[in-house]
Amino acid sequence: MTWIYHHDEPLTRYSLGVKGANPLICFGVNPSTAKPNNLDPTVASVGRFAKAQGYDGWLMFNLYPQRATNPDKMHKHFQKKIHDKNIEVIEELTRGLNADVWCAWGTLIEKRSYLSRCLHDIYKVLYTNSCSYFKRGRISKAGHPHHPLYLKKTAPPEAFNLDTYIKEVI
C-alpha cells in the first residue's frame, strides 16, 4: 500500500489516501488529526467503504484544509494561502480521473461562510473531469449531503446532483 499525504504539519492536511488506479474520492469539511497508519474514525470509514465497493484506492480531501478536531475552532476568517494550496493539490491528484466522488461534508458546510466559496473553487477543478457524484444517507433539511461518521454501514451510494446543489443550495 502506497500512501498519499500532502500536509503542512501540524496545521493543515490537503490530502490523505491510498494510491490506486481507480480511487474513490471523498470530500469532507475540514481535516482532523488523521495521517497514514493513524486514521481517525471518519477517514477509516472512507477507506472501509472504498474497499467494500471494490475501489483499489481512495483519497480524502476537504473543503478547507485547516486541521481542527472541533469545526467550531476553524478559522474565523478565510486563509487564501492554504485554500489555494488545497486547490492545487486537489487539481494535481484528480487530473484526468473520471472518478466517483463521495460528497460528505454534511451540515458542517454552514460553520463558516467561506466554505461555500471553497466548494465552488473545488467544483471548478472537478468539472474538468468526468466525475460522478454521490451521497450516502439522507440529505439534510437544508439540502446538504450526510457526513460519513453518522451513517449506517449499509447506507448505499445514491447519485447526488452537485450542479443543482451548487446553483440552488449554496
Image (spheres, rainbow, N blue to C red):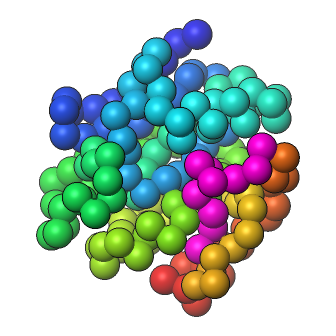
Q: Is the magenta stretch mostly helix, strand or loop?
A: loop
x and y percentages locating residue 169 in the rendered image: 55, 85
Q: Is 156 situated above or below 10? A: below
Q: Which of 9 and 88 is in front in this view?
A: 9
Q: In this view, does 161 lie above or below 8?
A: below
Q: Who is closer to the viewer here, 138 or 167? A: 138
Residue farthest top in this picture = 1
User: Which residue sits furthest bottom?
Assistant: 168
Task: Reply yes or no: does residue 112 show up in magenta.
Answer: no
Is 151 magenta? The answer is: yes
**Residue shown at the point (43%, 57%) measured from the top left:** 29
Q: Over which residues does the magenta segment extend? A: 144-153
Measured as percent of width and height from the top left, residue 66 is found at: 26, 49
Residues 58 and 35: in front is: 35
Estimate the x, y position of residue 34 in percent, counting from the top left.
40, 31
Q: Which residue is drawn at 52% across and 52% down?
A: 27
Q: In which quarter of the image is residue 138?
A: bottom right
Q: Please state if 24 lies on the left or on the right of 88 as rendered.
A: right
Q: Can residue 128 be seen in this view?
A: no
Q: Is residue 92 left or right of 114 when viewed as pictured? A: right
Residue 127 versus residue 140 in the image, above or below: above
Q: Classify residue 145 by image quadrant.
A: bottom right
Residue at 51% from the left image edge and 71% from the top image edge:
107
Q: How many marks?
A: 0
Q: Is residue 154 above or below residue 17?
A: below
Residue drawn at (62%, 38%) of the image = 46
- Left or right side of 77 for 38: right
Residue 139 visible in this rendered orientation of the protein: yes
Picture coordinates of residue 108, whole percent (x, y) = 44, 67
* Viewport quadrant of the N terminus: top right
